[in-house]
Image (spheres, rainbow, N blue to C red):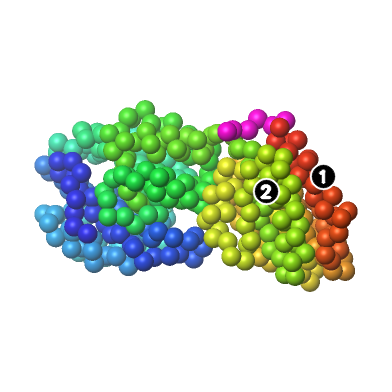
Amino acid sequence: MKLRKIADDVWLGGAVDWERRLFDALIPLPEGTSYNAYLVQGTEKTVLIDAVDLAKIDILMEQLESAPKLDYIVSQHSEQDHSGSIPALLEKYPEAKVLASPQGRTYLIDLLNLPPEKVTAIKDGETLSLGGKTLRFLTTPWVHWPDTMCTFLEEDRILFTCDFFGSHLAASETYATDERRVYTAAKLYYAQIMMPYAKQAAKNIEKVAPLQPAIVAPSHGPLFDQPAFIVDAWKEWTSAPPKNQAVIAYVSMHESTRKMAERLTTALVARGVRTEVFDLTVTDLGRLAMALLDSATLILGSPAVLNGPHPIAAQAALLANALKPKVRFASAFGSYGWGVKALEGIPALLPDLGAEFIPPVFCKGLPKEPDFQALEKLAETITERHKNATLGV
Ligand code: FEO
């Protein structure tokens, strides 16, 4: 990718990573990603805002050939997909200073072994004049790490946001034009990465929205020249109540738990509860996270394995617990061979959800009519809870 002009003396650079399929050795990237870097040239100083993953350093270096010099590298967030190439950049541009939030400075030194004297901590609200261009730095912690900050280019009203408002989406377009595609990618990104920090993200939206940027320029995925599109979406994801929707996430070894999942699904749908069902052996965890974002209830299904729930179900519980979705209710179901005790630990896998745990349904071997009736009752209880809760539409 060549540099693309987004305003006078402001360019989008960085790399589109079409092939990458996994992030943090955890997060599926069905549509790849991009590492956006921005070059801002004032009459006196030149700044690079964010860098790229080290794997794409050659592309960034080539783009920078057109820059006369590099005075500053603004590191808005120290995770290596944006900072990994900073050591190499400093070798090529030894005169450049790195600017980061106070936490970012610490992390850059820890994670990249940057010499402390090369990194300057900047305060919330501090400005930097480049000559005809003024950068204002705004700390926005927890979107995605405690170090994250945004940069507002005052004259052009461009808000650079790093992970905030981003999406893992490899695309050739500069701006979000295919709104449906970008909305889905951004929602997936939010659910997998930002959902645990929804409260902090909501505060950060309140902090940056009054700037009324003309362009929102994240460091992953397309830019937004109609910022309301992405800002309004984030407002909903962070703050709207969950919907009349349940997630059934299950594993089955010998069809018993699957039969329970099918009956519970039918029972919920018959009662008007929108239901998303995930067989965890084939589920994309990102899609599960996205479904949890909207759901009022999570129901985990697992057979007993040795002395506990199936490890794949336990992994999903661990993930759901860490993501802290807005679910209000949780429950479980599953089949055991010789002892129900193996499944009774499932609620303890979800301590941070803050959800009411509705009594689960566990059955011995293949489910029989009384077990199906118990699942009908569970569906009825969930439906009633949804009716009595304040849910979104
Ligand atoms: Fe895109 Fe948290 O790094």
Q: Secondary structure at mark 2?
A: strand
* Residue at 74 percent of width and 36 percent of height: 385
Is residue 358 found inside the magenta-colored segment of the image? no
Q: Position of residue 316 (x, y in %)?
A: 64, 59
* Residue at 37 percent of width and 33 percent of height: 228
Q: Position of residue 303 (x, y in %)?
A: 76, 64
Q: CA distance from mark 2 to mark 1?
A: 16 Å
Q: Position of residue 306 (x, y in %)?
A: 79, 71
For residue 377, the mark is: 1
Q: Which residues are magenta?
A: 388-393
Residue type at tag 1:
Lys
Q: Name the residue that disc number 2 marks.
A: 298
- Image vertical order of residue 186 relative to residue 229, above or below: below
Q: Left or right of 196: which side holds 169?
A: left
For residue 368, the mark is: none
Q: Is residue 66 visible?
A: yes
* Residue at 41 percent of width and 61 percent of height: 111
- Image vertical order of residue 80 relative to residue 158, above or below: below
Q: Left or right of 319: which side holds 5?
A: left
Q: Secondary structure at mark 1?
A: helix
Question: Looking at the magenta stretch, what is its main secondary structure?
Answer: loop
Residue type at tag 2:
Leu
The image quadrant that residue 51 belongs to is bottom left
Quadrant in which the N terminus is drawn: bottom left
Q: Nearer the viewer, residue 110 or 352?
A: 352
Other residues around mark 1 within 10 Å, as few (<14) / some (14–19) / many (≥20): some
* Residue at 46 percent of width and 50 percent of height: 189
* Front label number (2 vs 1): 1
Is residue 389 found inside the magenta-colored segment of the image? yes
Q: Is residue 126 visible?
A: no
